[in-house]
Image (tube, helix red, strand yellow):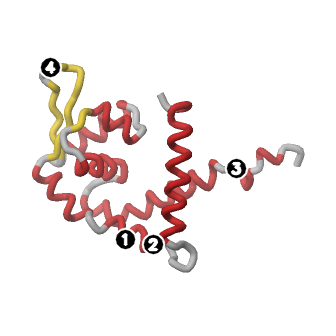
Amino acid sequence: MDTPQLLLKNQICFPIYASSRMITQMYHPYLQPLGITYPQYLVFLLLWEEDKRNVSDIGKCLLLESNTLSPLLKRLEEKKFIERKRIQNDERQVEISLTPLGIDLKQECKDIPFKIIENFNPKDFTMKDLENLKSILDKILNNSTAKTIK
C-alpha cells in the first residue's frame, strides 16, 4: 500500500476508541441495575466529589456539550437523583445538587471501580500497567483538549 498511514492497524485512534467502548461496556452490568448509564455515573462521580456544581462546570470536567449534558441531567432529575435549580444572582446558570437518593447511590457504587479492575487479567495487566495507561491517557487529554474541544 502506498499510504500506510491510512491502514487501520497503524492508527492510534482506533485502539483508544475501541478500548473506550469496551471499558464502557464493562460498566453496564453494574450500572444497569441501578438505573443509570455510564455518562450519568460520571456525573455522579463529580457530584460525590463536590456537590452543588453548575452545569457548565460539569460539562467542562466531562468534556460534554450542554446539548448532550442537559437531557442526561433531566433524566437524573426525573429519577429523583439530582435537583436542578437556577442560581439566584445569575439566572443563566443552573446548579446541580444531589438528592438524598443520589447521595445514597454512592454506597451502591463504591465497589464498581474494583469490579472493573477485576475484569483485566492480572497475567496481562498489573496495577502499575493500568496506572501508566491512565497517565498516558491523561497526557493525551491534557495536550489535545485545549486544541480541539471548545
Circle 4 residue: 89
Q: Is residue 11 left or right of residue 48?
A: right
Badge 4 element: loop
What whole-number distance in Å separates the C-alpha atoms at marks 2 and 4?
47 Å
Residue 89 to residue 18: above or below: above
Badge 1 element: helix
Q: Is residue 132 left or right of residue 53?
A: right
Mark 1 vs mark 4: which is more N-terminal?
4
Number of other residues with Cα within 10 Å of mark 2, as a class: few under 14, some 14 to 19, many 20 or more: few
Circle 2 residue: 119
Q: Amino acid at mark 3?
A: Gln
Q: Amino acid at mark 1?
A: Lys
Mark 3 vs mark 2: which is more N-terminal?
3
Circle 3 residue: 11
Q: Is residue 36 left or right of residue 127?
A: left
What whole-number distance in Å separates the C-alpha atoms at marks 2 and 1?
7 Å
Which quarter of the figure has residue 103? bottom left
Q: Amino acid at mark 2?
A: Asn
Q: Furthest-left residue in view?
A: 100
Mark 2 vs mark 4: which is more N-terminal?
4
Q: Furthest-bottom residue in view?
A: 123
Indicate which label's residue lies in the foreground, 2 or 4.
4
Which quarter of the figure has residue 90? top left
Residue at 19% over, 58% down = 105
In depth, the one of 98 and 8 nearer the eye is 98
Residue 15 pos. (x, y %): 62, 55
Q: Is residue 124 left or right of residue 38?
A: right
Circle 1 residue: 115
